Image (cartoon, rainbow, N blue to C red):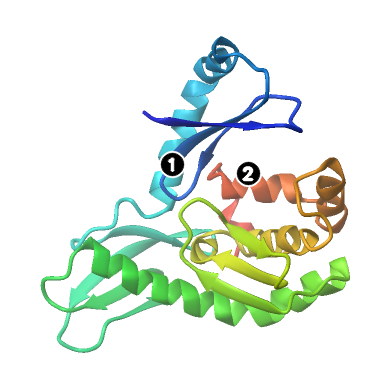
Amino acid sequence: MPVQVIRRPRMKNIRVRVVPPRGDIVLSCPFGVRSYEWQAVLREAWPRLMAARNRILQDCGENISPAGGRCRLWGRSYELRVVFTERASLARCTEGHVLVAVPPGSGREQIEACLYDLYRRELNRALPGILPLCEKLTGLKAKEVRLKRMQTRWGSCNIRERRIWLSLNLAKKPPQCLQYVIIHELVHLLEKNHTPEFHALVAKFYPDWQQAEAWLRGEPYDAGKGK
């Protein structure tokens, strides 16, 4: 399995993680670390990484098919029911399951596109309540917040334009994760890089950041604390 190795000048330790939604393995280490050193860390962490990767792939809907499956919304797992219709495509959460209606002959790609429309609606509904809270906690405000599908990030910040992008995949996670990611990106307006000062500010504004990070990594959590 490919492993992306990133060398960073300000790092002190070797860090390895699984990046949603595709389960990519990314290892970050300081300049000067020799190959055998990071390879040893990787070997030791491999069983844990594979377990986390399996959770992430399941969490990100890798079991979606025209026959149905399961998907997540706001931290809860739902049965996915797929029906075929000549009417316009739609997806909605109802009666303990997520219903997706797509044209006959649709495959996984069309089903996922329909689900992402649902995620966009859910996030747009949640943002008016969560965004002002994050702005109040941090004293920071972005000019614009946009949503899009992201492959390897939960969010990003264009500091010059003061624009924040949020991943549509956040609709799969507990609402606390949305708040955490918004705060994380707002802090980038003060600190461009992930410096110790940056992490200290994030921890100050969101003390439960470790729990939110665990949820984002796909580690087990109490869904009852979600939506």
* Residue at the left extreme, as displayed: 105
Residue 101: quadrant of the picture:
bottom left
Image location of residue 17, percent across then percent down = 56, 35
The tag on residue 84 is none
Q: Residue at x 23, y 62 (%)?
A: 108
The tag on residue 23 is 1
In the image, is residue 84 above or below residue 227? below
Bin the neighbour count of mark 2 within 10 Å (Cα to Cα): few under 14, some 14-19, many 20 and up: few
Q: Residue at x 81, y 46 (%)?
A: 199
Bin the neighbour count of mark 1 within 10 Å (Cα to Cα): few under 14, some 14-19, many 20 and up: many
Sequence-wise first label, 2 or 1: 1
Q: Residue at x 86, y 53 (%)?
A: 201
Give the left or right position of residue 73, taking residue 201 as reference: left
Image location of residue 33, percent across then percent down = 65, 17
Image location of residue 24, percent across then percent down = 45, 39
Which amino acid, mark 1? Gly
Quadrant containing the N terminus is top left
Q: How many marks?
A: 2
Residue 94 can be seen in this image: no
Q: Nearer the viewer, mark 2 or mark 1?
A: 1
Question: Helix, strand, or loop for circle 1?
Answer: loop
The tag on residue 214 is 2
Quadrant containing the C terminus is bottom right
Question: Helix, strand, or loop for circle 2?
Answer: helix
Residue 210 can be seen in this image: yes
Decide which of 43, 13 is in the foreground and name it: 13
Which amino acid, mark 2? Ala
Give the left or right position of residue 75, taking residue 80 as reference: right
Q: Residue at x 75, y 46 (%)?
A: 194
Q: CA distance from mark 2 to mark 1?
A: 15 Å
Give the left or right position of residue 4, taking residue 79 as reference: right
Image location of residue 209, percent across then percent down = 74, 50
